[in-house]
Image: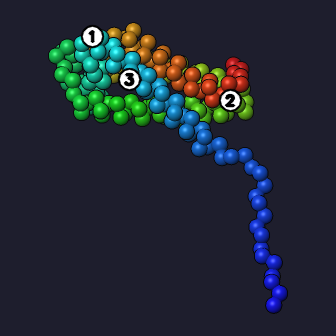
Amino acid sequence: MVAEPSTVSQAAPNSPPAEAPNVYAEGILAGLVGAGAIALWFLILDTIRGRPFYTPTVLGTALFGSGAGLSAPAQLPASLDLVLSFTWVHVLAFLLIGVAGARLLALAERDPDFGFGVVLLFVVFEFGFVVVSQLFAEPILHALAWQAVLVGNLIAAAAMAAVFRLRHPRLTIRP
């Protein structure tokens, strides 16, 4: 009896690893870091002021409670349900921003002209909260100091930019 040669499958040609999972993972990481940075900022500020979780309670009240109670925000009791609900939405928003930034950076690595889109994305989201608050929930700006919100957004943007910079050290941006 003669043994037949076994069929050996040929190895697939070397192809670059799938880029999409890496881009999404990077965006998720940046989003989590940004959300964590701004949450920590407000936890520190609220704790110094003697009202831990005040900021997410106010924002949760505005988002889920139709603003009821924002006419007298000083009497607004901290609510674990509102804090957790708002935190969930807040993290999801940052994840979306992180993934959008990571996708733009992936494009910018191939074409540096897209790099300006990343910068523009961060500028738009930096001031988006204040503008949206002024248009739809002005009591939020009375309950929270807009300067603290601006600094918190800058901290989150810087944290996300640091994540992206560490992962793309040679990235060049052309306007």
The earlier-in-sequence mark between 2 and 3 is 3
Residue placed under numbered mark 2 in the picture: 108
Closer to the camera in the image, 37 or 138: 37
User: In 3D space, how far apart are the residues under numbered discs 2 and 3 (Cα atoms)?
Assistant: 29 Å
User: In 3D space, how far apart are the residues under numbered discs 1 and 3 (Cα atoms)?
Assistant: 15 Å
> As displayed, is residue 126 above or below residue 104?
above
Q: Nearer the viewer, mark 2 or mark 1?
A: 1
Disc number at residue 66?
none
Residue lying at the far bottom of the rendered structure: 1
Residue placed under numbered mark 1 in the picture: 49
Mark 2 near mark 1, Cβ–Cβ under 8 Å?
Answer: no
Quadrant containing the C terminus in the rendered view = top right
Q: Residue at x 47, y 25 (%)?
A: 34
Residue lying at the far front of the rendered structure: 1
- Circle 3 packing at 10 Å, graded few (<14), some (14-19), many (20+), is many
Residue 144 visible, this orientation:
no
- Residue 138 on image: x %, y %: 31, 16
- Residue 80 on image: x %, y %: 24, 30
Quadrant containing the N terminus in the rendered view = bottom right
- Residue 149 on image: x %, y %: 39, 15
Residue placed under numbered mark 3 in the picture: 39
Classify mark 3: helix, strand or loop.
helix
Circle 1: residue type: Arg
The earlier-in-sequence mark between 2 and 1 is 1
The earlier-in-sequence mark between 1 and 3 is 3
Q: Residue at x 57, y 22 (%)?
A: 162
User: In 3D space, how far apart are the residues under numbered discs 2 and 1 (Cα atoms)?
Assistant: 42 Å
> As displayed, is residue 4 above or below residue 151?
below
Residue 108 visible, this orientation:
yes
Mark 1 near mark 3, Cβ–Cβ under 8 Å?
Answer: no
